[in-house]
Image (cartoon, helix red, strand yellow):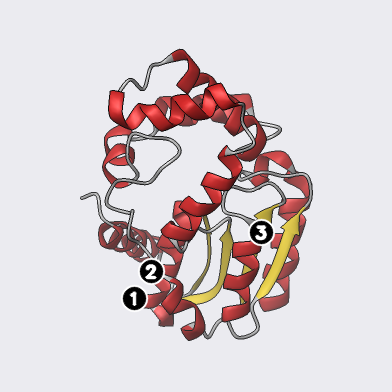
Amino acid sequence: MFTIERKVLELDSLRKALGIDKWNLMGHSFGAIIALEYYAAYPNHVTSLTFASGCFDVEAYAENTGLLLKTLPDSLRKAVDEVDTTGDYLNPLYQEAIIKFNDLYASRKPDLVESDSIVKTYNRTMYDYMKGPNEFKITGTLKDYNGTGYLPLIKVPALFTVGQFDTCGPQLIVKYAEQVPGGKYYMIPDAAHITMWDAKEENVQVVRDFLLSVD
């Protein structure tokens, strides 16, 4: 059940259950992958695509994460480098590295209520299987994923958004947008990966304007 194909099927089951023929899809982070793969499988059921901080090339994402890690103190980078060998994911320095990294590049203004809900309800087993146990590396089944070949084939309006300090890297997202005919790109200033927390009003306005333009 822990496959992209399964998630695409679940999404189409939702569409059918809601009685919708065509819809506007928005996916964030891993959800952007699902939105892209959904379009590849069911293009006739998609009106538009909004990709928020999409990780379409895992190798490129990993390289960008490596660059961002260099901004952390040496002691924390060392703990991150050692954790794959030791397997000690509870190491205090490793945990501190996660906190500092997330404060800079995951969300700069986290919604504590939503964050608490996510931590309590997300599927850790699936997360570790598909992403891997190391927060800074993708070693699970997604490690070789690259969906950029689909981008030039998109024939519906597409919006790509990204935070200025996003783990996905604005320099990567703008290149993805350029591969889509008529693709639109918007970088949200002073925001990290979870732009809907860091710049809620601007995030909503950008997406709303785009959806109104294709309605």
Helix, strand, or loop for circle 1?
A: helix
Residue 212, image x, y percentages? 72, 71
Q: Left or right? Give the position of 121 relative to 210.
A: left
Whether 113 is drawn above or below 48: the answer is: above
Left or right: where 160 falls relative to 152: right
The amino acid sitting under disc 1 is Ala
Q: Which of 129 and 70 is in front in this view?
A: 70
Tell me if residue 188 comes above or below residue 107 in the rendering: below
Which label sits on residue 170? 3
Q: Residue at x 66, y 59 (%)?
A: 170
Which residue is tagged 2?
Answer: 37
Give the residue drawn at x 53%, y 46%.
65
Which residue lies at the image location 49% right of the left edge and 77% below the top edge?
Answer: 151
Q: In this view, does 179 lie to the left or right of 5?
A: right
Q: What residue type is labelled 2?
A: Glu
Name the residue type under label 3. Answer: Pro
Task: Indicate the position of residue 175 as horizontal and vertical percent values.
Answer: 61, 72
Q: How crowded is mark 3: few (under 14 residues within 10 Å), some or many (20 or more)?
A: many
Q: In which quarter of the image is residue 126?
A: top left
Furthest-left residue in this view: 1
> Which residue: 33% across, 62% down?
8
Marks 2 and 3: CB-CB under 8 Å? Answer: no
Mark 2 or mark 3, earlier in chain: 2
Q: Which residue in the rendered view is the most extreme toward the top?
A: 92
Q: Which of marks 1 and 3 is in front?
A: 3
Q: Decide which of tag 1 and tag 3 comes sooner along the chain.
A: 1
Which quadrant of the view contains residue 187? bottom right
> How many angstroms separate mark 1 from mark 3 (CA)?
27 Å
Q: What element carries label 3?
A: helix
Q: Which image quarter holds the C terminus?
A: bottom right
Name the residue tied to disc 1: 41
Q: Marks 2/1: CA distance?
A: 6 Å
